[in-house]
Amino acid sequence: MIEVCALRQTAAGEWYPMELQATISKTDGWKRTISVTVPATEVEAAFSATAEKYRQKAKIPGFRPGKAPMAMIAQRFAAEIRQGVLETMVPEAFDGALRQLALAPLGTPGLSDVKFERGTPLTFDANFEIRPQVDITGYKGLKLTRQVYEVTDKDVDLALESVRDGAATITEVQRPAREGDVVTCDLQKIYDKLNRLKQTQFDNFKIELRSDRTRPEWFKGLVGMTVGEGKEIEIVYPADEPDPDLAGNTVLYRVWLKSVAQKTLPVAADEFARSVPGMKLESLAELRELLRKDLARRMEGAARRDLQAQARRGVVAANSFSVPAGFLQDHLDDVTKNMQSRDATITAEQVRAHFEPLAVEQFRWDYATAEIAKRENLTVTKAEVDAVVQSWPPNDRDKPDREKIHWSLLEMKVYDLLLSNAQIEDVQYAPQTRIIKP
């Protein structure tokens, strides 16, 4: 048995040592069970300190605050004092045992065999999983392929059209809807195959009628309609639809056309280039060159992200250690609860089948990232985190906390190290295969 000390905090915020004894009583894979004993003298001291707090706050008839007899306080608040001592001592003793036994738990521990009475030692067992101890290998010399894409004139044409589209004028017209128009509709849900859509009415729903952007059912059904006309249109949503309420769903809508607007793009000429906000351009040629450079930068960024993804897969494949089962189950339970809150028909088995491989890969990658950073002495400074915090839009509600920023910066440094030590082969991408859409 190892005698150790935990740190306790007084009501004034001061820290002092608490004596305890702790042993690792059971080892099973990543699972650990520790047995903890806190001497009776510590238990008595905690009872006395907690009772004194009650005496200072208690309003006892005939006594000023802090002057009631301790025996009266101990009797009147016996249950509250006991519960307060237990809720304070167990976490403090557990934290002290972890610190001194050099254990890093994953998730919330389970307590068992808790024995706690005034005048006797506090004893309990804690069951938990620890952070795995794995020697990460195979992260240097990875064989990767860099996708090189040459920006074409057609890509620049598409990017220019996108800029013109953003500057387009919208004019309401009195004629049947045709391709290129923007229509406004009222939709009413008639049928919902998966019964996910809680909303039944969608007013002032705008749809741009373009064959390359609009779902074919909307395009076919709305082209040719006139204002005031109604019809039923069935939409079959693919399984990869971003909206989980629509993914894999089939919905029948009743559609009423409210307005038809013609969209007119500005002419691609020098005058238009000079009107683009935020840019001091004199000609269309300058705008096209700027768009070409932007596309090239984006393609390079996409190629780098693809390299990072390859490196990540390579590291995970080279370090296929087992993931702590309890930690994995807790994660899947959380995912299941979240998914079922949106769709009660989803089962825990379906969640596990889909999300377990992703969770295992993420755990192995996060672990490898931390170990590689430690081995290669990669660190993130406070100044680096401060720079990200200061660059973030001040009113952005999604601003990440400092811990997430720190981890993201550390992960980027690990990626840099992996790529700088990798064997990278450049390959040309065929024009029909894009890393990103211009």
Image (cartoon, helix red, strand yellow):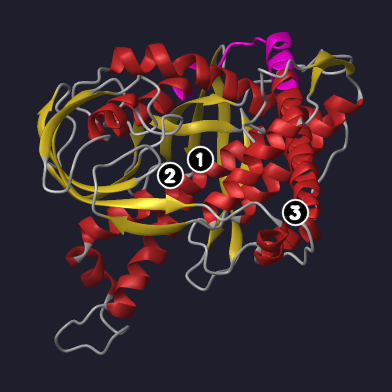
Most extreme residue toward the left, as rendered? 190
Estimate how packed mark 3 is, as few (under 14), some (14 to 19) or many (20 or more) residues with alpha carbons within 10 Å.
some
Mark yes or no: residue 67 visible: yes
Q: Could you classify mark 2 by the number of other residues whose Cα lies within 10 Å: few (under 14), some (14-19), or many (20 or more)? A: some
| SS at mark 1 in the image | helix
What is the x, y in percent for residue 419?
Answer: 85, 26
Q: Secondary structure at mark 3?
A: helix
**Residue extending farthest front:** 175
CA distance separating discs 1 and 3: 69 Å
| Point 77% across, 31% down: residue | 151
Q: Which residues are magenta?
A: 311-327
Residue sitting at 62 percent across and 32 percent down? 437
Q: Which residue is mark 3?
A: 284
Residue 231 lies, in percent from the top left, at: 11, 33
Q: Identify the residue position indicated by label 1 in the image.
A: 94
Task: Residue type at mark 1: give it.
Answer: Phe
Q: Earlier in the sequence, mark 1 or mark 3?
A: 1
